Image (cartoon, rainbow, N blue to C red):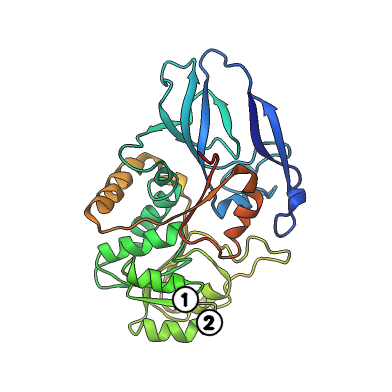
Amino acid sequence: MKNKQWQLAKRPFGETTSDTWLYAETDVPELKDGELLVKIQYISLDPAMRGWLNDTRSYIEPVQIGAVMRAGTVGEVVASKNEKFAEGDHVCGHQGVQEYAVTDGKMLHKVDPKIAPLSYYLGVLGMPGMTGYFGLLKTGEPKTGETVVVSGAAGAVGGLVGQIAKIKGCRVVGIAGGAAKCQFLIDELGFDAAIDYKSQNVKKALRDACPKGVDVYFDNVGGDILDDVLTQINMKARIVICGAISQYNNTTPVKGPSNYLSLLVNRAKMEGIVVFDNIAEYPVAMKDIAGWIDSGEMKVKDHVVVGIEKFPETLMMLFKGQNFGKLVLKVGDE
């Protein structure tokens, strides 16, 4: 059997290019005792993947040159010499951008396609869902009646954050790129207002959309938008730093917030989050999110691209604002 996979060929400077990756077809090795073979069906594409390519100190080790690109995956066990997993089981983990994975199963957990579509386990019931849930509720600490602003609001994390904030009784304003995404936030996800950063003056639009100021800001983009929001925060506001997608492909130093003194004036706090800090509580979050989906309080939007061969250009969709919802790569076309 041959295994299609994408390996890291060289570390990128700025945006990833064709030179960043090596497409390879390798032999699938024979299973040893305790191992299992997973046929990967869906691969999660997330902004954090760009940071994993940098050989710098971070919350996780960088992907090594020559290694299969790290990514969240869900698939089916097609052979097993591991007593904890049987053929036909569906499992979720970080098996990388490849068609098959041989693993000892230690970092896998079983999922049920009868409960939710497999792609959900990479989105609302996976890392993005856990990020939004804990980042908002534990770090943002929204209270009924407060105003919550979310950037990257039409993405996997942002859309979920806004919906949870609405469930908790907050006024929610989303920032996204393009009229269609903004209309989706209001019409489908129930946001109170949306700001199109591509066509509007964000600072002015924030003043109009948040007449009582901003109590919680969930930041997925960094850069100028973070600066604009800092001018509108209230006393004791909470700024949740989840990501800074506007800065990930910089070839110049990262642009930090120039309006940070607003934190001092308003006695506000800015705190970074990493989803893995909450692993022990994942079951609680998954139960809550599944319940909201079942009740109709939460809607899910996946953006599925078919074909593992399309990985490099599909990953770049995240940084061009081309994805609409959770971006997932379907490995096969069956």
Q: In the drawing, does residue 153 fall left or right of residue 69?
A: left
Residue 216, can we see it? no
Image quadrant in which the N terminus is located: top right
Point out which mark residue 202 bears. none
Are there few (<14), some (14-19), or many (20+) residues within 10 Å of tag 1? Answer: some
Marks 1,2: beta carbons within 8 A = yes
Q: Position of residue 259 (x, y in %)?
A: 54, 78
Please tell me which residue is depicted at 68% across the width and 36% down the height of the picture: 67
Which amino acid type is shown beneath numbered disc 2? Ser
Farthest residue toward the front? Answer: 334
Q: In the drawing, does residue 87 fall left or right of residue 40?
A: left
Q: Nearer the viewer, residue 3 or 73?
A: 3
Residue 94, can we see it? yes
Q: Position of residue 224 (x, y in %)?
A: 57, 75
Q: Which residue is mark 2?
A: 199
Please tell me which residue is depicted at 42% across the width and 45% down the height of the picture: 126
Q: Secondary structure at mark 1?
A: helix
- The mark that comes first in sequence, 1 or 2, is 1
Q: Position of residue 115 (x, y in %)?
A: 30, 39
Q: Which residue is mark 1?
A: 179
Farthest residue toward the left? Answer: 295
